[in-house]
Image (cartoon, coloured by chain):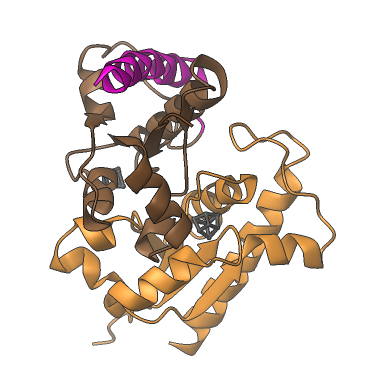
Chain colours: A orange, B brown
Amino acid sequence: MLEEIKPKKVGIIPCNGEEICEGSITRFASRKVLDKLRPNDTVTVCLPLFIAGGKEEREFAKNYPTITVDGCDKRCSQISTEKLSGRPYHSIVVSDLLKEHSIEPPKSRRALTDKDQAAVDLVADEITKKVDEILEKS
Amino acid sequence: MGKKVVVLPCSGIGKAYGEIGRQAVYDLAEDLKPEDVKTACLARLMIDDPETKAMVKDNFVITVDGCGMDCARKNVEAAGKQVDSSLRVVEAFKKHRDLKPQGVLELGEPGFKLAHILAERLSEEVDCVMKK
Ligand code: SF4
Ligand code: SF4
């Protein structure tokens, strides 16, 4: 009998940075991938659970190949995932990516405008590309 | 300079509770109590960022958590600071079951109402903490 081999899911961990607008982009772009672009292939975890949660949460990056999404080059998600859970497969820094593509960061961290959607789409597409790369290899 | 109140939401990404807490903190820090309240990236505590650790050490701290895992509170405590007060969004939900957020991040009108109610509750808490 042929069994369907299910590929692994990929874990996406945004930093959710509260201080700057790029932190909000990490959330919206990650949720776009989780809900719309690759809903069957991705999972997430609340980053602060690596400190507050139990063994299961801390083993997240051991159980899933992981992509961290950080708002700025402090790279809080990448560094804490690596320190507390396991080495991420890919790390995306939103501020760098926006600069590379000459896209302005949002003006408000509270609410994104229609114009800011370009930034969300760019980051979401980059996450999706990395998800597909990981799944192809696995 | 007098102490301020650092209000830190957990910004949970799995359910709307995290976004409601986050929006309530922005409401508080930018509209209701801009003179007394500031916020910071919670995750900076996870990387032992000295500036953020000093900020929580030198000021009052209130945490706002989406659920009973209390991540924001526990992260502040792990950084060596006892919080002055901690709130859970899920508690605010219990009293306002009619207000249902539309999505995890797209809260819609009911979700933003809930965030504002929470911001007002936090504003009272800020007054209490500053009187200490
Ligand atoms: S990576 Fe930057 S935006 Fe994200 S939590 Fe850290 S300091 Fe904040
Ligand atoms: S308190 Fe709950 S919602 Fe908030 S980060 Fe932790 S698990 Fe997520």
> Visible in this render: residue B102?
no
Q: Main secondary structure of the magenta part?
A: helix
Q: Residue furthest front?
A: B1
Quadrant in the picture for the N terminus of chain A: bottom left
Residue pictured at 79% horizontal, 63% vertical: A99
**Image location (x, y in percent) of residue B48:** 38, 65
**Image location (x, y in percent) of residue A87:** 39, 82
Quadrant in the picture for the C terminus of chain A: bottom left
Q: Is residue B118 above or below residue A106?
A: above
Q: Quadrant of residue A10?
A: bottom left
Residue pictured at 21% horizontal, 55% vertical: A52
Q: Is residue B49 above or below residue B25?
A: below
Horizontal side, residue A48 vs residue B38: left or right: left
What residue span does the magenta drawing correspond to? B106-132
The image quadrant where one finds ligand 2 is top left
For residue B130: magenta? yes
> Visible in this render: residue B92?
yes
**Image location (x, y in percent) of residue A63:** 27, 76
Q: Nearer the viewer, residue A52 or A111?
A: A52
Q: Quadrant of residue B25?
A: top left
For residue B99: magenta? no
Horizontal side, residue A55 vs residue B57: left or right: left
Horizontal side, residue A108 vs residue A43: left or right: right
Q: Quadrant of residue A81?
A: bottom left
Q: Is residue A129 above or below residue B25?
A: below
Residue pictured at 40% horizontal, 66% vertical: B47
Q: Nearer the viewer, residue A113 or B39?
A: B39
**Image location (x, y in percent) of residue B117:** 38, 13
Q: Residue furthest right?
A: A102
Residue pictured at 56% horizontal, 50% vertical: A23
